[in-house]
Image: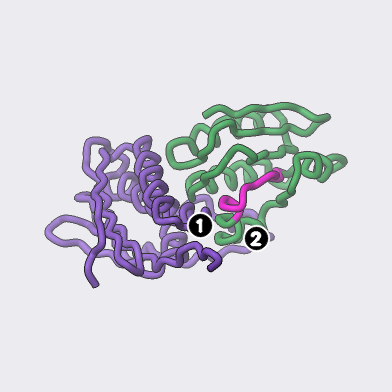
Chain colours: A purple, B green
Amino acid sequence: METAANITLMIESRIENVSLLGGAVRGIANALSLDELSCYQLELCVVEAVSNATKHAYHSETGHPVEVDVLLFQDRITFKICDEGESLKPAKVRPLRFDPQKLETVPESGMGLFIMHALMDEVSYETVGGRNILTMSKYLRKREHPV
Amino acid sequence: MQLHHTRNGDVLIVRPLEKRIDAATAAEFKENMSNWISAGNRRIVLNLKEVDFIDSSGLGAIVSSLKKIGTEGDLVICTVKETVMSLFRLTRMNRVFDIFASEDEAVKSLSGKA
């Protein structure tokens, strides 16, 4: 299926910059007339992915590029989060397991990948020529208007 | 990050005045909460009325505060927006924290707790 529209956003790997990308994604989601929850979820997934790139791929080192390509298809929106840092090990993707009654088992970190996998319809990760690309897609269900 | 705080009896009520608790603000949030807990505050209400975005780092900072209080007190949450609530449900944190519709109910739940 052909891409209807696309936009590329870029920040320097600085954690303070992540909310700028989040705001831009929320703006794009709003423009698509998505409901409030869907807008939040898309922003959340992109923020988690960009935070991971900044914190883990670049080890919180500033001065590196993090790029987000937003591709809008007729039936879905796709985000490609690209960095040139350390590649993510697939083993780090794990389900969120804990006992809510046992406080010591409740996680304080490591929830980002779980959130992305839970909220997005498709998530994949590849490294091509030293460039890490996390691709996430969400199929769109636009707000229904009464006829 | 600006955190408004007031006291109702021996319950500390903390209300973030910013719309986001995310990777950029989580460390500061956690440090402020930690200082209040170290100062002896063991019953805390976190009022999320103004907050419309929390990510996993923000959530982790809230969990960390609960763990620091330990079993000698409690941290409860109130007035959570539906979007933020969806994150608590997704991560099952709604089963870890007591979450109330109003600040009054949250304060009441802590009154009389050891």
Q: Which picture quadrant has residue A141?
A: bottom left
What residue lies at 30% left-to-right and 44% top-to-bottom? A59
Q: Position of residue A136 (x, y in %)?
A: 34, 63
- Residue B22 drawn in magenta: no
The crowding category of the residue bearing disc 2, from other C-alpha atoms within 10 Å (few below 14, some 14 to 19, many at least 20), is some
Residue A24 appears in the figure = yes
Residue positioned most to the front: A147
Of residues B76 and B35, the one nearer the viewer is B76
Work out whether A74 lies above or below B27: below
Name the chain letter of the residue that bears numbered label 1.
A
* Farthest residue, direction bottom: A1
Q: Which mark is residue A87?
A: none
Measured Cα–Cα span from mark 1 to mark 2: 30 Å
Q: Amino acid at mark 2?
A: Pro
A33 w.r.t. A118: above or below = above
Where does label 1 land, which residue? Answer: A35
- The residue marked by circle 2 belongs to what chain? A
Choose mark 1 or mark 2, whichever is in front.
Answer: 1
Give the number of the disc on residue A100.
2
Could you say where residue B104 lies in the image, as x and y percent from the top left? 80, 39
Packing grade of label 1 (10 A; few <14, some 14-19, many >=20) is some
- What amino acid type is highlighted by mark number 1? Asp
Circle 2 — which element? Answer: loop
Q: Is residue A102 left or right of residue A78?
A: right
Q: Earlier in the sequence, mark 1 or mark 2?
A: 1
Give the x, y percent position of residue A55. 34, 45
Q: Is residue A20 left or right of residue B113?
A: left
Q: Callout 1: helix, strand or loop?
A: loop
Q: Point out the stretch of residues depicted in magenta.
A: B75-85
Q: Quadrant of residue B5?
A: top right
- In which quadrant of the rendered image does the N terminus of chain A lie? bottom left
